[in-house]
Structures are given as structure tokens and as C-alpha cells.
Amino acid sequence: NEKKKFWNNGLTVQTDVAFSAKDFYMSAQLADLKGLMPKDQNKRNSLRINTTKEYGNFKATLNLNYVQSNYNVVNNAAYAGRFASSYNGSVYFTVLNTPMHVPLTTYKDIKNNKYAQYSNYYNEYFVNPYWAIEAHRSKGRTDNLLGALELNYNFFEWLQATYRVGTSFTYGTFKNENQPIETTQFAQDHRGQQFDAAPGSMADGSDFASRITHEFFLNGRKELPSDFTVNYIVGGRYR
């Protein structure tokens, strides 16, 4: 089945390392994700640190988590919007509309196989899906840093103070590249409108987002005579 052979077998390779001590924990993870789409690449690296310290009535807890993601994938949105309505869809839609008797995987080498090249592909209505994958790429990187710090102090048995601060920072970059459509003069003269030459395009950018949350409150518990207990808390939150 040529349509089935077109797709990759999905595979995720993950490596985890961790170190733990009395009041300290650190772990790292490397993940390489291979999806069904040919040529797509996704990688994720992460580092986590948790630690707690106590000094008399004072206690501090720190949690940090850093995640970096890198991707290089086909840009289906760019491909779908580039052609006339008969092309709209995705790589999956293009493969789905390939006749069963067509040896699809033999058209993988779009540079050296002349029948796989854009001008010579057999189909008048759908392009070579291997060309679509090669010509429409989206590349990017995202960095996420999450942090939380909690400070506690016990003034008395019946009164405790807590301060928490949580942070979230995200920074991302991307680059979308669409290769030009390069066709022979014969294809332009004798085949359909989709065989007209067209320029390529590129767009890149970056974004940054952050959030910081502060919390402070006093809380406690007081037992009174006659099995009566009072729990109380007062504080605020700011973001």
C-alpha cells in the first residue's frame, strides 16, 4: 500500500536522568519526537530543580522548571492557501487523493527524479506531496521558564505567615519558508494554471510573554475551651 508507506512510523525516544538528596531534587529530560509526517522533527529538553531549606521557624521552598522545544515541520496552512481550490487541504488530503495504482513513494526524490519534479508530475490537480513537504517549512524554538518560591515563618503555634511568588516566562521564535514554484517553459505553455512560476516567501518573528503572581497571607488555628476551634486566614494576591 503506497499511501501507507508514505507515512513514517511514529516514534518517541526519551532519556531521563534524576538526582535526589535530602532536601534537593534535580532531573533532566531529552525527548526526540518523530511523527507520522516525513521530514518533520520535534525535540524537547527540560530541566527541573526542587529544593527546600529549614532554619528554625523559617522554611523556604524553591521550584524551577525550564523547557526548550525545537521544531521543523511542514506548514500545512501555507500549502493549503497557495493554490486554487482543488489544492486546498493538507499533505494528508493530497496523499488521500492519489490513485491506488500510483507508485507514490517512487516520487520521493524531487531533485533527481525528473518525473517527481514539479513540472513533470503526472497529476494535473494535485502536486507531488513530497514537494509540498519540502517547499513549505515552519521552523521555531520556544523557551519556557516556570518558577515558584514559597517562604513560611511560624511566629507562634497559632500564627503563621506565608509569602509565595510564581513566575512564568515564555520566549519564542519562528521562521516560515515557502519555496518558489519553478517550472519549465513547456509546463507553463501546455499544462494548467497551477504550473505558472511563482515567487517564494519567508516570514519570521518572535514573541515574549511573562506573568508574575504574588501571594501573602497570615493563617492560624486556635483551640478554645469546650472543644471549640477557630481557623483564620487573611491575605491578598497580586498579579
Image: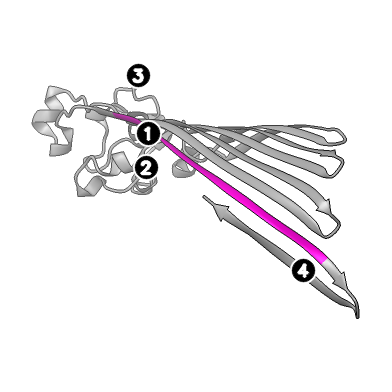
Disc 2 from disc 1: Cα separation: 7 Å
In the picture of the structure, the residue carrying the numbered disc 2 is 91
60 with respect to 90 (left or right): right
Which residue is rendered at x = 17% and y = 23% of the image?
Answer: 184
Relative placement, left or right, of 52 versus 5 is right
Provide the residue designation for mark 4.
231
According to the image, label 3 marks what residue? 112
Mark 4 or 2: in front is 4
Mark 4 to mark 3: distance in Å? 77 Å
Drawn side of residue 164 relative to residue 2, left or right: right
Q: Examine the image and state in which quarter residue 111 appears.
A: top left
Q: Residues within 10 Å of mark 2 (few under 14, many from 20)?
A: many
Q: Which residues make up the magenta segment?
A: 203-221
* Tag in front: 3 or 2: 2
Q: Is residue 13 left or right of residue 176?
A: right
Which one is earlier in the sequence, the residue at label 3 or at label 2? 2
Whole-angstrom CA distance, mark 1 to mark 3, is: 16 Å
Q: CA distance from mark 1 to mark 4?
A: 62 Å
Q: Earlier in the sequence, mark 1 or mark 3?
A: 3
How was this image coloured? one colour
